[in-house]
Structure formats: structure tokens, C-alpha cells
Image (cartoon, rainbow, N blue to C red):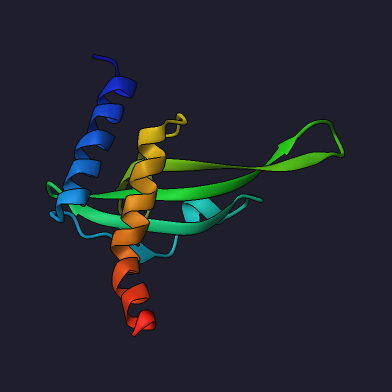
Amino acid sequence: MSTEDKASKLVGQVLRATYSGSILWRLSSPPASLTRATDNFVPVFLEADYKGKVIVVYEERYKHWTDEENFTWGAGVRFGVFLGNTVVTEFVKWSPLLRQLFEAAKNNATDVDSLIDNMLD
């Protein structure tokens, strides 16, 4: 099994664990290794403990240069393992499963359901 296939399988496992409530995600600041000396922007960075490791899922916005002077902004969701202040491995291939994990982790970390319920009262 390739590393990419293993990472995809891990994303699926983590998604199931997130839905079952056995993983608790938290909002955090992205490490300098992702933000220093780059135009990239990380608006949402989430981390959780999973099997003795810190895993992360985050959105990264980046400039996509079309020539020397023109660019557009692109965005992608990333998943990885965090050691110290560095994401040492990351899964960057676009996949619906990864996007679903990002949304589930964001909802888990912010407890959106309770937030909305409290505002409805």
C-alpha cells in the first residue's frame, strides 16, 4: 500500500473517530513553519491527539501565479502529523473525505450545534 493510500485510510479512520466523539479537536494557531517567509495564509488550524500523536487538519490559502505579475488565490485542506512545531508529514491531495474531515473537526472544535442552540433560546 502506498503512503498516499495509507494517509487516505488514516483520514477515513480519523473521520469515523471524530463522528463517534472519541477525538476532540481544538482550534490552534498555525506554527511558524507554515506561515513564516510565505504569502500563504492559514485561517483555520485544528489539532487533536490520536493514538499518542498530534494530528492536524487545516485550510491553507495560497497564491497561484499565472505569470510573473498575475496571480489568483487558491485554497486547499491539509492533513498531517505534528511533531514539535512542524508538520512532519502531510496529505495534500484533494479528496471529499479530507474536506469532510475538516468540516467535522471544525464543528467538533467549535461545538457549533450548542452555539446555535444557545442563540435560538
Q: Position of residue 114 (x, y in %)?
A: 29, 73
Q: Where is residue 2 in the image (x, y as percent from the top left)?
A: 29, 16
The residue sitting at 28% across, 36% down in the picture is: 11
The residue sitting at 79% across, 31% down in the picture is: 66
Relative height, residue 78 to residue 58 (above, below) = above
Assign the C terminus to one quadrant of the image. bottom left
Q: Is residue 20 found left or right of 25 in the rendered image?
A: left
| Residue sitting farthest toward the front | 121
Relative height, residue 67 to residue 26 (above, below) = above
Assign the N terminus to one quadrant of the image. top left
Q: Can residue 54 be seen?
A: yes
| Residue sitting farthest toward the bottom | 121
The residue sitting at 25% across, 34% down in the picture is: 12
| Residue sitting farthest toward the top | 1
Rendering quarter of residue 96? top left
Q: 13 or 85, which lies in front?
A: 13
